[in-house]
Image (cartoon, rainbow, N blue to C red):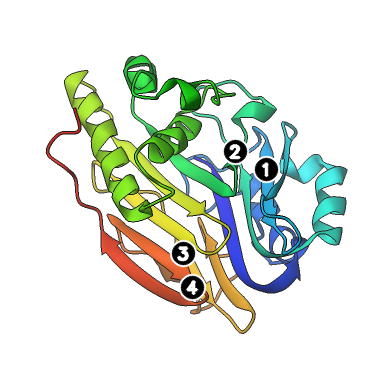
Amino acid sequence: MCRWLAYQGVPIYLDELVYEPEHSLVHQSLEARKAVTRVNADGFGLGWYTDERETPGQFHEVLPAWSDDNLRSLTHHIKSHRFMAHVRSSTGTQVSRSNCHPFIDDQWMFLHNGQIGQFEKVKWELEKHLPEELYIKRNGTTDSELIFLLMIKNGLRDDPIAAINITISEIEDVIADKGVTEPFRASMCISDGQSFWVVRYSSDGHPPTVFTKCCERGMVLASEPLESGRAWHIMQEQTIIHVQACELTTYPITLLKSCA
């Protein structure tokens, strides 16, 4: 299982969350506390927005986050009002830059922790659901990138809540058709550059954790708290939250009967 964080608020340097807290994301890459996999060493990624550009910047690398001096330097010098960071623990796909999160399409950015159970059994069927213009954008081999492209296909740009529900239902339909018994588990964060949509879902009722913290400077979202204290609140299971500033709007995940 991977670890991730996201932030929106007044501009801050990325290392204030990636490195400085007592249980920072880089520390979690060595010793995650709320994940099955304690070490997340299969690459990392950053994605950040600025007021000067419409599309986000990104940096991906396959080295462990704790050992990359470029990451330390970049996070010390990049300041952003909205960004995502991710450390990866592969669930079977190769370690490569194209498989590192976050994934980006135009102004949209996406990251994911979890997996589609027995992905190799459903991969081809799900890929066939993509139209050609989205299929050719698929650079890596992860289920995460495929989930993102399915959401775009299902109307993410126009109605994110509906697109998320349709995509989860579509995946669950294929899982059922293929007789897969392992669960689909996901914590996901999505942004259009203006706000966040965060998802916590699992078909077996045990989704990966997501915590929220509102502070004076803005909102922090993370797979696990970056420091001790009572300020962190765990996100409700089987829900989507829309995050604008420190305002959270919660929507239940509604599975559709069939997306065929």
**Count of labels in the image:** 4
Q: Is the residue under label 4 in contact with that under label 3 (CB below 8 Å)?
A: yes
> SS of the residue at dot 2?
loop
Q: CA distance from mark 1 to mark 3?
A: 20 Å
Where is mark 3, residue-wise? 211
Q: Say which label, 1 or 3, has the lower sequence index.
A: 1
Percent position of residue 193, x then y: 58, 58
- Residue sticking out furthest to the bottom: 216
The answer to whether any part of residue 5 appears in the image is yes
Q: Is residue 28 left or right of residue 203?
A: right
Q: Amino acid at mark 4?
A: Trp
Where is mark 2, residue-wise? 88
Q: Residue at x 69, y 64 (%)?
A: 17
Q: Residue at x 67, y 60 (%)?
A: 24
Q: Amino acid at mark 1?
A: Gly
> SS of the residue at dot 4?
loop
Between disc 1 and disc 3, the foreground one is 1
Label number found at residue 232: 4
Q: Residue at x 66, y 36 (%)?
A: 41
Quarter of the image for residue 100 reads: top right
What crowding class fits label 4: few (fewer than 14 Cα within 10 Å), some (14-19), or many (20 or more)? some
Q: Say which label, 3 or 4, has the lower sequence index.
A: 3
Q: CA distance from mark 3 to mark 4?
A: 6 Å
Percent position of residue 57, x then y: 72, 48
Between disc 2 and disc 1, the foreground one is 1
Q: Amino acid at mark 2?
A: Arg
Q: Is the residue under label 1 in contact with that under label 2 (CB below 8 Å)?
A: yes
Label number found at residue 45: 1
